[in-house]
Amino acid sequence: VGLGLAAWSMIGAGGGESRILRVSGFAAALGVVVLLGAVAYIAAGPGFGHDHGETDEHQHEAGDAEEGDQSRVPREEGLALATLAWSGNSSLSEGDAHNHSGVVFDVDDLSTREREALADEFELASAVVDEYMGVEQALAAGYSQTSPRVDGVGYHFTKWSLVDEPFDLAKPSQLLYEEVTFGEGLELVALSYWVASEHPPEGFAGEADAWHRHFGTCFVNGYLVDEGVPDRDSCAGDWVNGSDLWMLHAWIVPGMKNEAGVFSAANPRICERICAAEN
C-alpha cells in the first residue's frame, strides 16, 4: 500500500520528462523490492510455511526434524520414545552393528503345518493392511514418519508405544510406505515389527522370519538422523541402543510380493541401488 501511495504521489507531481523520470525511478525501486523479497523467500528454503502433518517430499528430509519442533510426534508417542531411549545401556558394546539373524527367508522350507499356520497369520494381518493403506490413516492412529527413504524398504512410520510391547501380528509398531507409482503419493508396501526382546521374538509360524537389529540410532524429534552412534552423549536427541530391539519386515501387501522372500529386509521391486549391489 505504501509503495502504491508513493507511486501515485511521485507520478502525479510534475509532468513531461520529469514524470517519465519519476515513473522510471519508481519502477527500478519496485524491482529491487521484488528481487529482495524473492531472495528472502528462496533463502527460507522448501520448509517455509511447511505443515508437518503433510508427508510430501520435503518431510522426507531430516531438515524438517528441527530441534524444538514436537508437532510431528504425538505427545504420548514422544514420551514412549524417551522411555525407550533411556531404558537401555548408555553405550554400545564392542561388535554391535546392524545385522541380521541369519535365518532362511524361503517359506517353502517350512513344513506343511507351518505353511498353513503362516497363511492363517497372513490373513489376520491383512486386516492391518486394509486399515493403513494411506499415510493419513497411519498419522491418525499415532504413527509418525521416523526415517528418510531407505532403498528397497521405503519410509518407516513408527508408533513408539508399540515398540516395547510383545509381538502382535495385528499391531505392527511400524508401517513401510513408498511412492510405488511416480507422482501418486505414498502407499503402504509392508508391515514392520520392531519388538523389544533379548532374543529374536517367536514372531510368525516357522523359522522363516528374518529378524534384524539397528544399533545406536539417534532420533531428533522422532526422526532418524544417524545410526551407529556409539553412545547417548553423542546424540543430540533420543539415542536408542538397539541391542534388545528386533525388527522384521513382512511383505504381505497385495501387489508387493517380494521375490527375495516374504520376510526379506529389502524388496527388489522398490530397490534402485543396494539390491543390485548385493546381488
Image (tube, grey):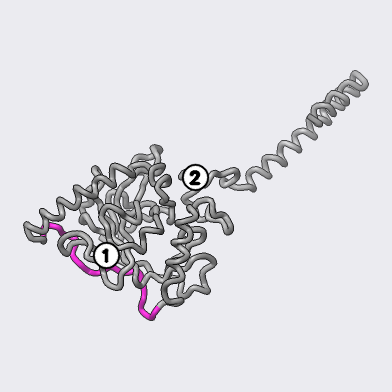
Q: Quadrant of residue 85?
A: bottom left
Q: Determine the main secondary structure of the stretch shown in magenta.
A: loop
- The image's mark for residue 211 is 1
Q: Residue furthest bottom?
A: 94
Q: Is residue 215 above or below residue 123?
A: below
Kind of residue at badge 2: Gly
Where disc 2 sits, the SS reads loop
Q: Look at discs 1 and 2 and give the one toward the viewer.
A: 2
Contact between marks 1 and 2 (CB within 8 A): the answer is no
Q: How many labels were placed on the picture? A: 2
Q: Is residue 107 left or right of residue 186?
A: left
Give the mark nearest the N terminus, 1 or 2. Answer: 2
**Disc sitting over residue 53 in the figure:** 2
* Residue 124 location (% of width, % of height): 21, 49
Q: Which residues are magenta?
A: 93-109
- As helix, strand or loop, the secondary structure at mark 1 comes to loop
